[in-house]
Image (tube, helix red, strand yellow):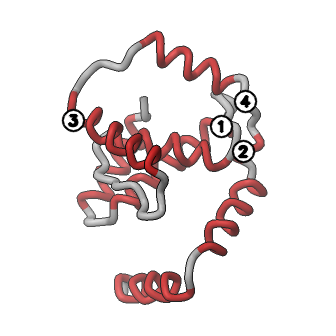
Amino acid sequence: MPEKETLERARRDKREGKSPSTQAGEFVREEIEHIREGKHGARSTKQAIAIGLSQARRAGVDLPPSKGSSPQVKEQAERDLRKAHSGRKKSAKRSRATTKALKREGHSAASKEALSSQARSVARKRSAASKSRSAKKAAATRKK
């Protein structure tokens, strides 16, 4: 369950008209913090990010899966969005099992080195046009 502070930050982002990915970023940040604090671990940086995005969707952030996602990821994203609207209680047994499994994982997935290499590898995959587009958008939305 995300912390109240994280939910509030995401709601504030939504009120300010920020994109769903910015709202979801709050949940990813919280997840990275949890791993660093030692609450639990993660097998990889990618897994830590995926957990954060899943929590964001379940908290009601309208975040669709990326275009290049595999069918399994798209299915999971759809399931998370459905769960956000269903209002069903989370299974305590399943939640405990997940937490227990994550506790067995390492904590290096949230290190600065791991995060920076993840960011670099993702940036390398982006096209020049994509990077240029987002730079132009950032320049247009920057506070004057």
**Circle 2 residues within 10 Å: few <14, some 14–19, many ≥20:** many
Above or below: residue 127 compared with residue 45: below
Q: Dot 3 corresponds to which residue? A: 85
Residue at x 41% of width, y 61% of height: 22
Above or below: residue 48 compared with residue 1: below
73 and 44: which is toward the camera: 73
Q: Is residue 84 left or right of residue 91?
A: left
Q: Dot 4 corresponds to which residue? A: 105
9 and 59: which is toward the camera: 59
Residue at x 22% of width, y 26% of height: 87
How many numbered markers are drawn? Answer: 4
Instruction: Kindly check if marks 4 and 3 are in contact, taking CB atoms under 8 A apart as contact.
Output: no
Instruction: Kindly check if marks 1 and 4 are in contact, taking CB atoms under 8 A apart as contact.
Output: no
If the image is split into quadrants, where does the C terminus sit? bottom left
Q: Dot 1 corresponds to which residue? A: 35
Could you say which disc has been placed on residue 109 in the image?
Answer: 2
Instruction: Kindly check if marks 2 and 4 are in contact, taking CB atoms under 8 A apart as contact.
Output: yes
Above or below: residue 74 compared with residue 37: below
Q: Is residue 89 left or right of residue 123?
A: left
**Circle 4 residues within 10 Å: few <14, some 14–19, many ≥20:** some
Instruction: Kindly check if marks 1 and 2 are in contact, taking CB atoms under 8 A apart as contact.
Output: yes
